[in-house]
Amino acid sequence: MKQKLTFFFSIITTAVILLVGCNKSSPPTQPLPAELKDTVNISVKDVTHRSVSVNVQSTMNNVQLSVSLYRTFNGADTLVANFPVVVKDTTIIDDNDGAGLLINTSYGYYAVLTDTTGAIKNKTDPITVSTLAPTSHNFTWQEYIIGDDIGISSNSLYDVWGTDENNVWAVGTVLINDTGYGVIKWNGTEWRPNKKRGGLMAVYGFSNSDVWAVGNSVEHFDGNQWSRVDANDTGQYVVPIATILHDNIPYTSIWGTSSNNLYLGSGWGKIIHWDGKKAKLISEIFTSHIRDIWGFSNDDIYIISQIDDI
């Protein structure tokens, strides 16, 4: 019996060894992965006198989360923006809903991740940033004396426009060597006479070869020369070629989206539209002088006028 028993156990032992050897190619059992946690981070991208731009970046393992950016000032927290976590990377410009932040003032910012119940899942450390002070820009101004020194009223400039630091036009009336100029141009080094005949009040353009100047006349520069648009001027007499444009001079302001879509403000309180070929009266403010005009589109134009006493 003992011999048989010994043989029996030997067989079992061998079987177990063979069984273990057959399972070598099976992967070991892995532990369950831990829950992936989402995080959020913020950084300051830009600062102006009245606004702060904050970049917000977050992971998005759980797309049900939302991100909230807060501003802290005088111990109070104000929600600046709230958006779903799937946005992932965005820059928020905080200008206090258009009212503007305070100049030269410190503000704190932080962001939080919350789930659908409002529970906080992650929160950034607060960062502090200050808006610019009025003297934050170190400007160095240079003064230029232009024109003959024969009286202040003889040399007056009213408006300026340019495309870059080497191409700037100024308009008005400037006497240089007893000759009157209505336009002078900055070439990056010095101011040079650009067009004879004064009496111009405003300048606006679209490129170095597409500039308009208005006042006692309507003038256009094509990159090579100035041409009068409202009338032909021989030096002895003036013949209107765009009657409405000519009849409403002097002009005090000009703005437009192109040379085929210009708005001119008249000293008679009228707004004239020029489509590149003809002029049209589109608005008249009685007992008023148009002082300036500016816009962003045909549907968003602003006019400043002076109302005369009736």
Image (cartoon, rainbow, N blue to C red):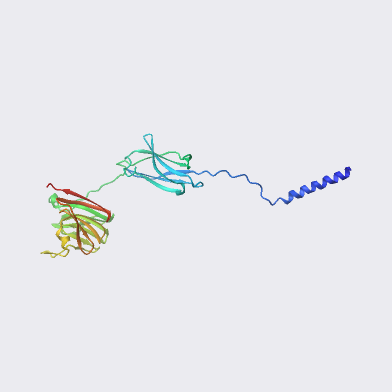
Asked if residue 188 can be seen in this view, the reply is no
In this rendering, would 27 be left or right of 310? right
Q: Is residue 226 above or below residue 20?
A: below
Q: In this view, does 265 lie above or below 103?
A: below
Asked if residue 81 can be seen in this view, the reply is yes
Front-most of 204 and 57? 57
Q: Where is residue 129 in the image (x, y as percent from the top left)?
A: 38, 40
At x 43%, y 42%, the residue is: 68
Farthest residue, direction top: 75
Q: Where is residue 29 in the image (x, y as percent from the top left)?
A: 65, 46
Front-most of 219 and 178? 219
For residue 72, what is the image quadrant? top left
In this rendering, would 35 be left or right of 89? right
Farthest residue, direction front: 117
Q: Where is residue 197 in the image (x, y as percent from the top left)?
A: 15, 59
Front-most of 95 and 127? 95
At x 44%, y 48%, the residue is: 89
Front-most of 175 and 205? 205
At x 79%, y 48%, the residue is: 14
